[in-house]
Amino acid sequence: MIEVRDLRREFTVTTKVGRFRRERRVVRAVDDVAFDVAAGEAVGYVGPNGAGKSTTIKMLTGILVPTSGHVRVCGVEPSRGRRDLARRIGVVFGQRSQLWWDLPLRDSFELLRAIYRVPGGDYASRLRECVELLELGAFLDTPVRQLSLGQRMRGEVTASLLHGPELLVLDEPTIGLDLESKERLREFLADLNAQRGTTLLLTTHDLDDIERLCPRLVVIDRGTVLADGPLEALRAEVAPERVLVVDLEKPAELAGLPGVTSSRAELNGLRHHLTFSRADTTAAALISAVAARAEVHDLVVVEPEIDDVVRRLYARR
Ligand SMILES: Nc1ncnc2c1ncn2[C@@H]1O[C@H](COP(=O)(O)OP(=O)(O)OP(=O)(O)O)[C@@H](O)[C@H]1O
């Protein structure tokens, strides 16, 4: 669905030096990026501010022309076949609208239907589905400028799906939304991917979006790909330590258990936090070792937070 090789984009920026001189400098925003996305995947494209995420997305959608490299999206070269591509993909920019500010949402949708020449039956069924799942009914006749951010974002997502795209590219789709709106949108996108098979590529700073939606992560920093793989594999690679938290029936000492790299006790020895590495032991073996020493009341295995995984990936540089 997406094929990117040796992708590069440079910008020339002019900065003022002293009172009269200006200096031209080349900024390489995307530097030899390569990745593929197969049909039906849901991939998170993450990185710190200025990493090159938006620049990549703009090249994938044909808004920006690459300085060099190879990009194909749905078999189309985006900068040459922008119109053709627009019929096959949907794009949502959290910070930019594709809706007509003064028109009611419903009229914006009608205009998009005409632009993309969507057959009446397909349009009606897609709109009905989005209205129902994204709960748009109450504000379909409200001008876009009067909508809340959460309502507008639901409108943006609907607008991007009316022509039935194979791929949906989202740049910061949940930015600024309240928790309930975020969750509703995530659930909708997860269903779209799982049930319709729509491929998703999204950039986000909210790692809960990734945890909820994207089994695979491409991490970019300073224009280059730092890591690419399933979230679980990256977690195991850079943050292999997990913590077994056990509550005991009676206080006990749990020092020296095999595979435990550090431990901490609280509640007068009733609760223990045992840190262990995947390479040294398994959760099952550790639980058996604890149970052989003391009567276990309850337990939980805590995985490293996704924020921690991503922070360690950035730090690895
Ligand atoms: N039009 C432009 N002219 C000059 N420099 C640019 C331009 N667009 C982006 N850049 C620079 O390219 C780099 C990458 O920017 P980009 O917007 O792709 O980052 P990002 O990962 O999307 O960041 P953020 O998370 O802050 O949105 C930055 O150093 C940015 O200043």
Image (tube, rainbow, N blue to C red):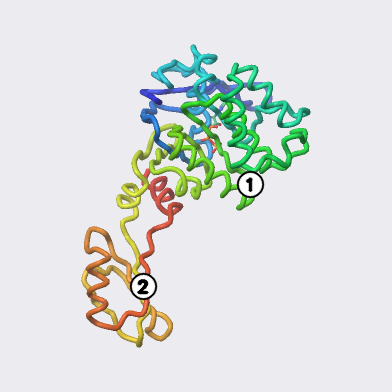
Q: Which residue is mark 1?
A: 177
Indicate left or right for 92 with 263 as reference: right
Where does residue 23 sit, x and y in percent of width and height? 58, 22
Give the residue at x 37% y 23%: 6
Q: Is mark 2 within 8 Å of ligand 1?
A: no
Q: Quadrant of the C terminus?
A: top left
| Relative to 226, 152 lies left or right | right
Asked whether mark 1 lies closer than 8 Å to ligand 1, one says no
Name the secondary structure under disc 1.
loop
Assess whether mark 1 and mark 2 are in contact (beta carbons under 8 angstroms). no
Q: Who is closer to the viewer here, 210 or 25?
A: 210
User: In the image, what residue occupies the spot 58% across and 20% down?
Assistant: 118
Q: Amino acid at mark 1?
A: Leu
Ligand 1 falls in which quarter? top right
Which residue in the structure is indicated by mark 2? Answer: 299
Mark seen at residue 117:
none
Q: Is residue 73 above or below residue 52?
A: above
Q: Residues within 10 Å of mark 1 (few under 14, many from 20)?
A: some
